Amino acid sequence: MDFIIVEKDVAPFVAVVRLNRPKELNALNLQLMGELRDSLEALDADDTVRAIIITGDRRAFAAGADIKQMSGKTATDMLIADQFSTWDRIKRTKKPIIAAVSGFALGGGCELAMTCDMIIASETAKFGQPEIKIGVMPGAGGTQRLTRAIGKAKAMELVLTGKFIDAKQAEAWGLVNRVVPEELYLEEAIKLASEIAAQSPIAVRLAKEAINHVAESHLNEGLHLERKNFYLLFATEDQTEGMNAFIEKRPPNFTGR
Ligand code: CAA
């Protein structure tokens, strides 16, 4: 694997999955997402693992889906490739997953953290759904999970302006479990994972399933609508303009077409 590092036995029954594309701030390209899906599938089937941590590096958990890889795509390309279907497998992981977040967790990065079951944040963490700034919208659960986590009004503000919130704000709004100093975020996640890994794995699995029933019932229809709308935006001039502007490092000129 090129973009994922899996470390087992960081503590008894605990595995760490590290996103490893540091120069691109762990932008989630198709290969990285495929590798992440495959590693989670393997860890889910591995009896020596009872709790999983997903992390990035200090600068970024992940700065979103890879804009450079998506910029030239049409709506038809997006619908046929259905790239976010990879995320469905991640969502079905039976073992508990903790996101250990430092630095940027933006767009797909924030969505990936929210797809996990718990989030431990470094005090340097920044969360946001900035897709609107590049002429699109969240496509991998942002509109649905953020709204469930922090409520409609705050989710509207974040998704419609693209602004970021810091770790303290994310904690106050209930997005993250807790915030710890930067040098401790992974350690804290391992501590929490170890506490969970010491319990009965089958009881943990069924409890996770039951909690997700509350957190995620009716989620699928919402995810489906969001994904379709995201793909549809690739039929617009604003998507092309927004993504090109990001790549060319200039402000976008949106026309609503
Ligand atoms: N896709 C592709 N490349 C990215 C990227 C992304 N999402 N985020 C950062 N990068 C690249 C940059 O292009 C840059 O590459 P070069 O060195 O080759 O120019 C490198 O990573 C470092 O980034 P910056 O120079 O921009 O670093 P910065 O510290 O000045 O800014 C940032 C950091 C604010 C996170 C900025 O990089 C940024 O705004 N990134 C994009 C965030 C974003 O819009 N995410 C949403 C993507 S769409 C999505 O995720 C859809 C979905 O729902 C799944």
Image (spheres, rainbow, N blue to C red):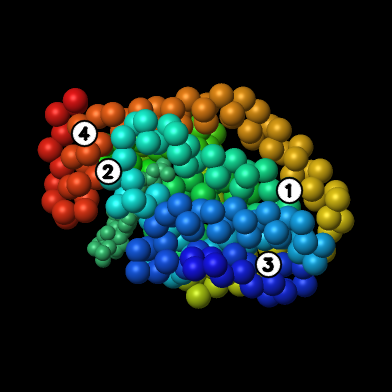
- Mark 1 and mark 2: Cα distance apart in space: 36 Å
Q: Amino acid at mark 4?
A: Asp
Q: Amino acid at mark 1?
A: Lys
Residue at the spot of label 1: 94
- Mark 2 and mark 4: Cα distance apart in space: 12 Å
Q: Please state which of the two labelled residues, at mark 2 or mark 3, is closer to the viewer.
A: 2
First in sequence, mark 3 or 1: give its number: 3
First in sequence, mark 1 or 2: give its number: 2
Q: Which mark, by number, is residue 133?
A: none
Residue at the spot of label 3: 15
Q: Is residue 203 visible?
A: yes
Classify residue 48 by image quadrant: bottom right
Label 3 neighbourhood size at 10 Å, few (<14), some (14-19), many (20+)? many
First in sequence, mark 2 or 3: give its number: 3
Residue at x 72%, y 67% (from the top left corner): 14
Up the image or down, 122 lies above or below 165; here it is below
Label 4 neighbourhood size at 10 Å, few (<14), some (14-19), many (20+)? many
Q: Secondary structure at mark 1?
A: loop
Up the image or down, 35 lies above or below 206; here it is below
First in sequence, mark 2 or 4: give its number: 2
Residue at the spot of label 4: 238
Q: Amino acid at mark 2?
A: Gly
Residue at x 39%, y 27% (from the top left corner): 229
Q: Nearer the viewer, residue 37 or 200?
A: 37
Q: Please state which of the two labelled residues, at mark 1 or mark 2, is closer to the viewer.
A: 2
Classify residue 39 by image quadrant: bottom right
Q: Which mark, by number, is residue 72?
A: 2
Q: Is residue 160 visible?
A: no
In the visual, does 14 lie left or right of 33?
A: right
Label 1 neighbourhood size at 10 Å, few (<14), some (14-19), many (20+)? many
